Image: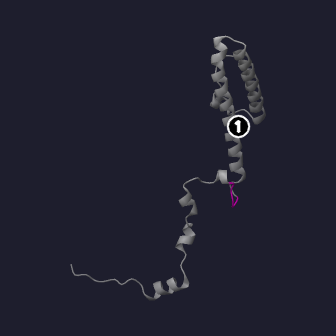
């Protein structure tokens, strides 16, 4: 359907659409934006000039929904894989990402294990 009313595209309304429909809508919005820009150059009505803003935001909204859908598909695809693409990994901070894993931190050398077994912490009985 072609949206030539002054309404902006709302994300929650277009999330239910499939990718083909979204791309079609994106195409119509881009054509409309082109027409509006031509109208701007040729001295169009003020209503058309103010509509450029609305159409640009609508295009952004459609693109955002398309990207979000793609990322959720990728997440499903890589959910049980060992390695994930960089854009699907937890961002956190560089230092946290470089940090040793919990398993690596818990590892002990043979010498440390022997020392812990042979020399346990002493318990002292204290007078109250």
Q: Point out residue 22 in the picture as x, y percentages from the top left corner.
A: 74, 32
92 above or below 127?
A: above
Residue 84 belongs to the span the image colors magenta: yes
On-image quarter of the C terminus: bottom left
Which image quadrant for residue 125?
A: bottom left
Q: Point out residue 32 in the picture as x, y percentages from the top left corner.
A: 74, 21
Residue 83 belongs to the span the image colors magenta: yes
Q: Nearer the viewer, residue 99 or 23?
A: 99
Q: Residues within 10 Å of mark 1 (few under 14, many from 20)?
A: many
Residue at (71%, 48%) from the top-left corner?
74
Q: Nearer the viewer, residue 102 or 41?
A: 41
- Magenta part of the chain: 81-85
Which image quadrant for residue 7?
A: top right
The reply, left or right, for residue 112 in relation to residue 91 is left
Which image quadrant for residue 110?
A: bottom right
98 above or below 1?
A: below
Residue 112 visible in the current orientation: yes
Q: Point out residue 86 in the picture as x, y percentages from the top left corner.
A: 66, 54
How does the figure colour the protein chain or chains? one colour
Residue at (66%, 21%) from the top-left corner?
52
On-image quarter of the N terminus: top right
The residue at the far bottom in this view is 118
Residue 6 visible in the current orientation: no
Q: Which residue is mark 1?
A: 66
Q: Point out residue 42 in the picture as x, y percentages from the top left corner.
A: 73, 13
Residue at (47%, 86%) from the top-left corner?
115
The residue at the far left in this view is 128
Secondary structure of the magenta portion, mostly? loop
Number of disc labels: 1
Residue at (67%, 34%) from the top-left corner?
15
SS at mark 1? Answer: helix
């Amino acid at each position: 359907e072609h949206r030539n009313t002054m309404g902006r595209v709302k994300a929650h309304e277009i999330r239910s659409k499939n990718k083909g429909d979204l791309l079609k809508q994106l195409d119509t919005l881009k054509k409309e934006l082109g027409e509006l820009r031509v109208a701007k150059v040729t001295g169009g009505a003020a209503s058309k000039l103010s509509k450029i803003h609305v159409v640009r935001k609508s295009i952004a909204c459609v693109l955002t929904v398309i990207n979000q859908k793609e990322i959720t598909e990728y997440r499903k695809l890589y959910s049980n894989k060992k390695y994930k693409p960089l854009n699907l990994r937890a961002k956190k901070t560089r230092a946290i990402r470089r940090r040793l894993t919990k398993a690596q931190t818990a590892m002990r050398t043979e010498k440390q294990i022997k020392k812990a077994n042979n020399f346990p912490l002493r318990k002292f009985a204290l007078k109250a």
